[in-house]
Image: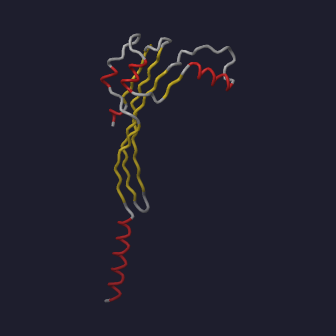
Amino acid sequence: MQGLFKSLFKIIGVLCLVFLFTACVVGRYYEGPQIPQEKIKEIKPGVTTKEEIISWFGPPQNYISPTIFNEILREMDVTREPLTNYPFANILSYQYNRGNIRAIVLILFNYVDAKVKSDHLVIFLDDNEKVKYYGFHKGTGEL
């Protein structure tokens, strides 16, 4: 009879350890400031200034100036012809990332599913620091 209790106690102990080392994880991931869509509708090419953009959306994550960009290309010896101001200079870039994460952690099997989507706003400025054109893509709506 004691042998039966010992083996039953061992089985219960192993099952408790198995349950202690298993987990289920659900989480969310956020990165960067949200891009207010009501302000995107107010952007007017040729009218909206760089100062207005920065006051609406905050400082950009990326800004490319033609002089800095030309210096980088010159140092890297990328171009063979004389450098001029490139049409993709003076770009303000904003990005907001959001993700959903799910995971099951077992002793012999683990499963992780992560879906991360982004909202992108890219604004091209002319020489007078006014909006030349812009583009917006809302990817976080797919989550």
Front-lying residue, 96 or 65: 65
Please say if 91 is above or below 34. Answer: above
- Marker count (numbered): 0
Residue 32 occupies quadrant? top left
User: With 76 as the anchor, is 113 left or right in this view?
Assistant: left
Residue 44 in the image: state x and y as whole percent: 37, 13
When the figure is inspected, residue 104 is found, relative to residue 2, above or below; the finding is: above
Residue at 36% over, 24% down: 56
In the rendered view, tell whether residue 27 sits above or below residue 64.
below
Q: Position of residue 59 (x, y in %)?
A: 43, 28
> Between 130 and 81, which is closer to the camera in this rendering?
130
At 56% from the left edge and 18% from the top edge, which residue is drawn? 66
Q: Position of residue 73 (x, y in %)?
A: 64, 23
Q: Quadrant of the N terminus?
A: bottom left
Q: In which quadrant of the rendered view does residue 138 lie? A: top left
Colour pattern: secondary structure
Q: Residue furthest bottom?
A: 1
User: Which residue shows up at 35% across the image and 48% down it?
Assistant: 27
Left or right: 67 in relation to 33: right
Q: Quadrant of the C terminus?
A: top left
Q: Residue at x 34, y 50 (%)?
A: 26
Task: State the image coordinates of residue 71 (x, y, percent, origin top left).
Answer: 63, 22
